């Protein structure tokens, strides 16, 4: 299989996977709600707006679950700033490089 045919084959597989993985649905949603989501998200169309809204909803749910986990089992820090600074210096990294991207 030549390079061109291999690339076309790869592209065809991507298109096929996208068609298989995307789900076409019918939903009854108020026009006002759809227009508000489009405006708030800056989406170009209804599909994009719904994808943004659903991803945002799931992100917020995951953050809420994480916050709940943290309140029940708080994060413990084992290293103070001195230990972190010492570790960074041993590795040859300066805090200036880590924070600003350059040393001075």
Image: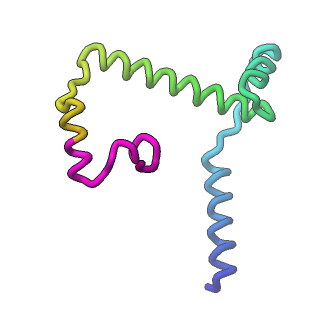
| Residue stretch in magenta | 86-104
Pick whichever, 53 or 80, lies toward us. Answer: 80
Q: Is residue 80 left or right of residue 54?
A: left
Residue 14 place in picture, x, y as percent:
63, 60
Q: Say which quarter of the image contains residue 64.
A: top left
The x, y position of residue 42, in whole percent, is 76, 29
Depth order, front residue of 82/19: 82
Residue ID at (24%, 48%): 89
Residue pictured at 39% horizontal, 43% vertical: 96
At x 30% / y 19%, what residue is drawn?
Answer: 70
Task: Please tell me in which quadrant of the rendered image residue 75 appears.
Answer: top left
Quadrant where the N terminus lies? bottom right
Residue 94, horizontal then vertical, whole percent: 33, 47
Nearer-the-camera pick, 82 or 34: 82
Q: Is residue 89 above or below residue 8?
A: above
At 81% from the left and 20% from the top, the residue drawn is 35
- Going by the image, does 34 lie left or right of 95? right
What is the quadrant of residue 23 in the picture? Answer: top right
Which residue extends farthest front? 104
Residue 98 to residue 63: above or below: below
Compared to 3, does 69 lie above or below?
Answer: above
Find out whether residue 15 is within the magenta segment: no
């Amino acid at each position: 299989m030549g390079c061109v045919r291999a690339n076309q084959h790869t592209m065809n597989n991507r298109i096929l996977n996208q068609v298989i993985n995307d789900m076409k649905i019918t939903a009854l949603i108020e026009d006002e709600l759809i227009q508000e989501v489009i405006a708030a998200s800056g989406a170009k169309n209804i599909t994009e707006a719904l994808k943004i809204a659903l991803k945002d909803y799931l992100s917020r749910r995951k953050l809420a679950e994480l916050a709940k986990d943290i309140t029940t089992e708080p994060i413990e820090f084992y290293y103070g700033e001195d230990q972190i600074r010492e570790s960074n210096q041993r590795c040859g990294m300066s805090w200036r490089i880590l924070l600003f991207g350059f040393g001075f």
